[in-house]
Image (tube, rainbow, N blue to C red):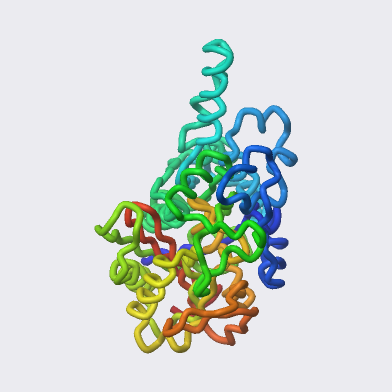
């Protein structure tokens, strides 16, 4: 008997809001979460704005726990608690519960801060918590400790595709029968001078310092780079059998995933979009769906000149003539780019899109690049009745490509 994996809990904290309801409300209103960075260290940077968490996680966690966690883990734990509470899971066999949470960079801020302590104050001032704070698996491990997961804890690290790769891995584990429930998603917390300077030196960041809320503008002819952001998104998924037995509410189905690699360049996307499109095709095959079943795509759409164009080609290649009936959104226009947390947040947005039957808008698209051949929503768009299938794309440095397919609850597929 085939296994169906359903989504029963959602949690997020990001530049738009500190929870899922607030995030969806902000997306539907087309609000930007991008602001100037007020910290002194940003004053001399080429790009002086970012998507900082609307609600700082250290105001939610108790003081002792917050001090033991890197920013990336703080954000993940906050989002994980919301998702867990939303799922209403009170009694789970810990040996059938797993965690899969990705991050692109991990505990970089803790590493930099500890190095500064060592450099300026000596070895005795280096915290014994440094290693468990900076290790990339800390967000997943702390969520696992929070909920007592014993079926496995996983941390895919694939740059900006990490969150979606973690979702894919969690899905695979449930389909293989290795767990009944999984807590899956991604996180990142590196709004800091070093990564912002490094990305700026790569010419990757927008420099629209006078209008930060308008800087992230996917598919606009005046786009000039992405906007760094922080946050986390976590989903609770479980087998349909497990969810039904406990009477859980179901947002939708985690229908499939597809993973490929460009084999092209360490940072630049393949301009043909070939392997990005292949990831979408694989996700559809896993979902036992065809291009004509797709209603919505939440694109990776980082607002970089090369990336947006390549992805547009990939969407057209994957969907063929069916692309004319697909509504495409670029929610990074509102949230900025959460790196390892981006795919998870955008998969969460896809879940809400099919649940509410509405695609979120793409803001700041004032002058759309010509010849794209896709239907980009610039205001909330009704997705209609019947079965809905949405794809979320996530692409990362190194040539990582991950597409996730989600469908509405009770879809006949």
The answer to whether any part of residue 253 appears in the image is yes
376 left or right of 85? left
Q: Is residue 238 left or right of residue 84?
A: left
Question: Relative to 51, is 256 above or below?
Answer: below
103 lies above or below 2:
above
Which residue is nearer to you in this view: 318 or 110?
110
Residue at the limit of the structure toward the left, as seen here: 263
Query: For residue 330, what is the image quadrant?
Result: bottom right
Residue 237 appears in the rendering: no
- Give the camera-side residue of 46 and 199: 46
**Residue name at image x 39 percent, y 49 percent:** 158
Whether 161 is drawn above or below 61: the answer is: below
- Residue 36 point in image, percent of width and height: 68, 52
**Residue 300 horizontal/vertical position (percent):** 47, 65
In terms of depth relative to the viewer, which is nearer, 17 or 348? Answer: 17
Q: Residue at x 53, y 71 (%)?
A: 222
Q: Residue at x 51, y 77 (%)?
A: 328
Quarter of the image where one finds residue 318: bottom left
Q: Position of residue 105 (x, y in %)?
A: 46, 42
């Amino acid at each position: 008997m085939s296994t169906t994996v359903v989504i029963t809990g959602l949690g997020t904290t990001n530049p738009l809001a500190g929870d899922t309801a607030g995030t969806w409300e902000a997306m539907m209103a087309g609000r930007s979460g991008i602001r100037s960075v007020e910290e002194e260290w940003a004053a001399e940077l080429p790009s002086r704005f970012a998507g900082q968490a609307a609600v700082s996680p250290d105001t939610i966690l108790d003081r002792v726990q917050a001090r033991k966690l890197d920013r990336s883990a703080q954000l993940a734990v906050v989002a994980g608690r919301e998702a867990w509470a939303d799922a209403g899971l009170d009694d789970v066999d810990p040996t059938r519960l797993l965690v899969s949470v990705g991050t692109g960079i991990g505990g970089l801020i803790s590493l930099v801060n500890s190095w500064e302590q060592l450099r300026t104050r000596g070895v005795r001032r280096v915290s014994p918590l440094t290693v468990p704070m900076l290790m990339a698996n800390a967000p997943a491990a702390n969520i696992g400790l929070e909920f007592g997961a014993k079926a496995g804890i996983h941390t895919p690290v694939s740059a900006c595709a990490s969150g979606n790769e973690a979702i894919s891995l969690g899905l695979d584990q449930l389909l293989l029968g290795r767990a009944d429930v999984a807590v899956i998603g991604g996180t990142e917390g590196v709004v800091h001078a070093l990564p912002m300077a490094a990305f700026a030196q790569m010419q990757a960041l927008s420099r629209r310092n006078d209008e930060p809320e308008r800087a992230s503008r996917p598919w606009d002819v005046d786009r000039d780079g992405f906007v760094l952001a922080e946050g986390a998104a976590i989903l609770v998924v479980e087998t349909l059998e497990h969810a039904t037995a406990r009477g859980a509410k179901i947002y939708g189905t985690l229908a499939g995933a597809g993973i490929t690699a460009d084999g092209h360049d360490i940072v630049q996307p393949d301009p043909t979009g070939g392997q990005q499109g292949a990831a979408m095709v694989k996700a559809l095959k896993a979902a036992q769906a065809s291009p004509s079943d797709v209603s919505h795509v939440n694109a990776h759409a980082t607002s970089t000149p090369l990336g947006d164009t390549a992805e547009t080609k990939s969407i057209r290649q994957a969907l063929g003539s069916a692309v004319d009936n697909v509504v495409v959104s670029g929610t990074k226009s509102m949230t900025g780019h959460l790196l390892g947390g981006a795919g998870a947040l955008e998969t969460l947005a896809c879940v809400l899109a099919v649940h509410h039957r509405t695609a979120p808008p793409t803001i700041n698209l004032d002058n759309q690049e010509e010849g794209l051949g896709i239907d980009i929503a610039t205001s909330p768009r009704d997705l209609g009745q019947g079965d809905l299938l949405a794809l979320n794309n996530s692409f990362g440095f190194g040539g990582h490509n991950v597409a996730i397919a989600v469908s509405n609850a009770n879809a006949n597929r």
